Amino acid sequence: MSVSWPPDPIRTGRLVLRESEARDRAAFVELSASPEVNTYLGGPRPPDELDRMPEVPGRRPGVFVVDLGGTMIGAVMLERRDLGPPGRGRPEVDLGYLFRPGAWGHGYAAEACAAALDRFAASRGPRRPARTGVTADSRRW
């Protein structure tokens, strides 16, 4: 089964997951420039890189803007990866997310990721996303 893009918005109890729009650029810049958000992701992006960010960043298959009350608070990404040795890896789907620090601690990431995974499962069948990554918030573990 193929996945069409852009998808229809996904609505949860509090959030809307949708395609990126030009009005989201400032929030993408904030996420990319934040030392807190990027602590375990190589650090914040340099200013010259942020200046080159497209007018509508994040507009590609698998990227959902997480919208709360009309404002972008984060993004959820589903990306295909080949896990294993080069040329012999198996295709998997990687789940990633970034949220503005003011949105941390309210369960938004869990709610948004669950909704994105539900959409993925409905469109692709029983294939599970890969379980790789960095546990950035050790206070929760």
Image (cartoon, grey):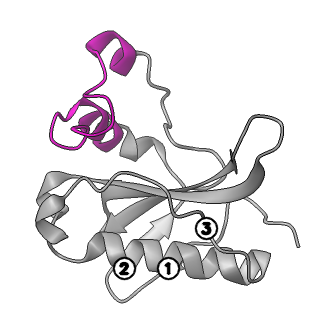
> In the rendered image, which quarter is residue 68 located in?
bottom left
Q: How far is the residue under mark 1 from the one under mark 3?
A: 13 Å
Disc 1 is placed on an element classified as helix
Please identify the residue farthest to the right as the structure is shown: 1
- In which quadrant is the C terminus drawn? bottom left
Residue at the far top: name it.
48
* Residue at numbered disc 3: 129
Q: Amino acid at mark 1?
A: Ala
Q: Residue at x 78, y 63 (%)?
A: 4
Of badges 1 and 3, nearer the viewer stands 3
Which residue is nearer to you in this view: 88 or 112?
A: 88
Q: Reply above or below: 56 against 64.
A: above
Helix, strand or loop at mark 3:
loop
Chain part drawn in magenta = 27-51
**Amino acid found under the numbered disc labelled 3:** Pro
**Residue placed at 26% from the left, 38% from the top?**
38
Circle nearer the viewer, 2 or 3: 3
At a point 45% along the width and 41% down the height, the residue shown is: 22
Q: Residue at x 82, y 43 (%)?
A: 88
Q: Which mark is residue 115?
A: 1
